């Protein structure tokens, strides 16, 4: 099994992004680039990071009307990311159109409920019920729409996988047992995420803010 860790390179500083990625490249399976990096460096920055030689996960969490999302996916297609995110709450037509517009080799995965949210945040947006129910509901929508998988927390991944055995499951919100959680609310350890059925785990600050990012990545890989 290849390394399941995608390191989240969340910085607007290209030199720092390259330095961290270069340090950890032997102990992670891919690089996740999100809004912070993309807003600063766009497609040229993604191409630059791709020269490091690891698969690229473009975590842009697209969420708009179907036509706009499909056109955005088309515009991103020359990058041929390994993984691209959209928001499941954009609805079935948006998910279908995003998948249709993506390159064949790109996994389109739908974000269900951000790991920085809990049930009280959900209630504040007018959605009643648990995080578990919300994730399982949106995972069913994603499967029906024909995308490749979902993003969810490690607390729900086993239930989502049981309902969608062929799905691809991306789990962020991963923390070491004694580590700071920061703004994340639904966290699990790397081992628990993989045991629950994560296809890949996304790890950002526990690696990138460590004194020795390579040692941190190696230590996490050693627990899997
Ligand atoms: O529900 C989600 C979806 C995406 N993310 C992204 O993952 C990383 C997590 O970084 P940490 O530093 O390990 O918290 C970050 O890039 C988020 O944008 C998420 O956390 N939760």
Image: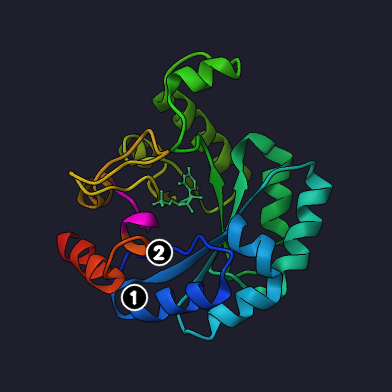
Relative placement, left or right, of 189 versus 40 is left
In the structure shown, which secondary structural element does the residue marked by tag 1 occupy? helix
The residue located at (60%, 19%) in the rendering is 125
- The answer to whether residue 52 of the structure is visible from this angle is yes
Residue 93 on the magenta span: no
Q: Check the image and report above or below for 70 versus 21.
A: above
In the rendered view of the protein, which quadrant contains the N terminus? bottom left
The residue singled out by tag 1 in the image is 24
Q: Earlier in the sequence, mark 2 or mark 1?
A: 2
Q: Is mark 1 within 8 Å of ligand 1?
A: no
Out of 103 and 72, give the one closest to the viewer. 72
Circle 1 residues within 10 Å: few <14, some 14–19, many ≥20? many
The residue located at (35%, 60%) in the rendering is 209
Relative placement, left or right, of 130 versus 196 is right
Residue 205 on the magenta span: yes
In the rendered view of the protein, which quadrant contains the C terminus? bottom left
Q: Check the image and report above or below for 196 versus 119.
A: below
**Way the structure is coloured:** rainbow
Out of 194 and 42, give the one closest to the viewer. 42
Task: Give the Cα separation between the discs numbered 2 and 1.
Answer: 8 Å
Q: At which x and y percent is residue 85?
A: 58, 53
Circle 2 residues within 10 Å: few <14, some 14–19, many ≥20? many
Pointer 2 and pointer 1: residues touching (CB < 8 Å)?
yes
Quadrant in which residue 218 is drawn: bottom left
Q: Check the image and report above or below for 90 versus 11.
A: above
- The answer to whether residue 127 of the structure is visible from this angle is no
Q: Which mark is residue 7?
A: 2
The residue located at (40%, 38%) in the rendering is 184
Where does the magenta region start and end?
197-206
């Amino acid at each position: 099994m290849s390394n399941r860790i995608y390191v989240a390179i969340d910085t607007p500083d290209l030199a720092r992004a390259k330095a961290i990625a270069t340090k950890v490249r032997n102990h992670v399976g891919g690089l996740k680039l999100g809004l912070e990096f993309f807003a600063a460096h766009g497609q040229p920055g993604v191409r630059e990071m791709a020269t490091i030689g690891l698969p690229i996960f473009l975590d842009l969490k697209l969420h708009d009307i179907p036509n706009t999302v499909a056109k955005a996916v088309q515009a991103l297609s020359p990058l041929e990311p390994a993984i691209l995110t959209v928001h499941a709450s954009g609805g079935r037509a948006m998910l279908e159109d995003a998948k249709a517009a993506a390159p064949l080799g790109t996994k389109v995965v739908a974000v269900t409920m951000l790991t920085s949210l809990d049930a009280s945040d959900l209630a504040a947006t007018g959605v009643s019920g648990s995080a578990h129910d919300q994730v399982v509901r949106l995972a069913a929508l994603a499967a029906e729409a024909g995308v490749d998988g979902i993003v969810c927390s490690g607390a729900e991944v086993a239930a989502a996988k049981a309902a969608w055995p062929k799905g691809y499951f991306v789990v962020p919100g991963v923390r070491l047992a004694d580590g700071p959680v920061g703004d994340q609310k639904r966290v699990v350890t790397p081992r628990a995420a993989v045991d629950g059925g994560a296809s890949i785990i996304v790890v950002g600050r526990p690696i990138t803010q460590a004194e020795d990012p390579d040692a941190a990545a190696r230590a996490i890989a050693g627990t899997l």
